[in-house]
Image (cartoon, rainbow, N blue to C red):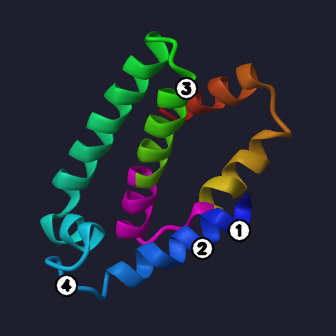
Amino acid sequence: MDNTLTQLAQVLEDRKQQSADKSYVASLYGKGLDAIVKKIGEEATETVIAAKNGDKGQSIYETADLWFQRLVLLAHQGLHPNDVLQELQRRFSLSGLDEKAQRANKQ
């Protein structure tokens, strides 16, 4: 599955070079951060609604949309899905409560 994220990350990078009238992702990049995060908010809401409705198929569909939009933001910020996967891997060595306490101490 990691290969899927890598392939998608490459496509998203490639879209940076395309024109906004030829690519949805390029149009998001062109609109900037506010448009990208707005789309993430919309998809997050749709994901919650699908989950609350108990529709597993729709939950999968909406989660895919949410993940996609989040990957667009990562690419926009010059980040790669592997950056997130490395952070998740780091957290394997921590309990959830310890990790949460560390975040609280940093704030």
Looking at the rendered structure, which numbered label has been put on residue 96?
none
Tell me residue 75's x, y (percent). Answer: 42, 68
Label 4 crowding class (10 Å Cα cut-off): few <14, some 14-19, many 20+?
some
Would you say the residues marked 2 and 1 are in contact, meaning their CB atoms lie under 8 Å apart? yes
| Residue with the mark numbered 4 | 19
Name the residue rendered at 72%, 19% in the picture: 97
Q: Residues within 10 Å of mark 3 (few under 14, many from 20)?
A: few
In three-dimensional space, the C-alpha distance between marks 2 and 1, rounded to whole angstroms, equals 6 Å
User: In the image shown, does 34 or 59 lie closer to the viewer?
Assistant: 59
Q: Which mark is residue 3?
A: 1
Q: Residue at x 14, y 77 (%)?
A: 21
Q: Which secondary structure type mostly characterizes the magenta part of the structure?
A: helix
Question: The magenta stretch spans which residues?
Answer: 69-81
Query: Where residue 88 sits in the image (x, y, percent)?
Result: 71, 46
Name above or below for residue 42 compared with residue 96.
below
Compared to residue 7, the image places residue 95 above or below, namely above
Residue type for callout 4: Ser
Q: The residue under label 3 is which amino acid type? A: Ala
Foreground: disc 1 or disc 3: 1
Helix, strand or loop under label 3 = helix
